[in-house]
Amino acid sequence: MDTEEYRDHPVRSYVLTSGRAHPSRNTLRPETLVRAVESRPVLSTASRLERELVELCRGTLALAEVAAYLQLPVSLVAVMVSDLVDSGNLTIRSNHQAHVLPGKDILEKILDGLRKL
């Protein structure tokens, strides 16, 4: 099989996430860093895929990298990661910062500069 060829996953995504389409945390983005909590054993009820995900995260990886290694959509892995963060098996580090809008004085200077063009 050609590696560039599309391969469908044999189990539907909604089965892997118990029917959920959104993670319990809205801070997960593809660049969010994920790391396993070393002192925390994986729950006995965890699926094979969840165990594999935790094992992958023994080193720090971005959410998008984890999805690529597991060959799953990022949105699906985000739901799984949020569950594992909730259970204490993973920690996340997000660099997402709220947008800071410039002050009115700066916007007026920019507008004045544009008018002069």
Image: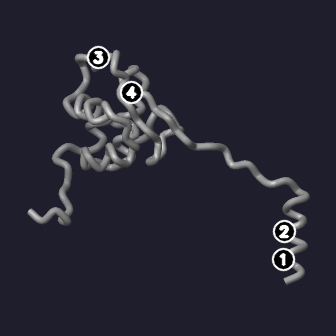
Q: Is residue 59 above or below residue 9?
A: above
Label 2 close to label 4 by CB (< 8 Å): no
Distance from disc 1 to disc 3, alpha carbons, whole Å, reads: 59 Å
Q: Which residue is mark 3?
A: 41
At label 1, which amino acid type do we have? Leu
Judge from the rendering whether residue 89 lies leftward or rightward of residue 32; answer left or right: left
Label 2 close to label 1 by CB (< 8 Å): yes
Q: Which residue is mark 4?
A: 90
Distance from disc 2 to disc 1, alpha carbons, whole Å, reads: 6 Å
Which residue is located at x 19 percent, y 30 percent? Answer: 48
Residue 33 sits in which quadrant? top left
Please identify the quadrant where the C terminus is shown: bottom right
Judge from the rendering whether residue 74 lies leftward or rightward of residue 32; answer left or right: left
Tell me the element at label 1: helix
The label shown at residue 114 is 1
* Percent coordinates x, y for residue 73 in the rendering: 33, 49
Name of the residue lying farthest toward the bottom = 117
The one nearer the camera, 11 or 78, is 78
Q: Which residue is mark 2?
A: 110
Colouring convention used in this rendered image of the protein? one colour
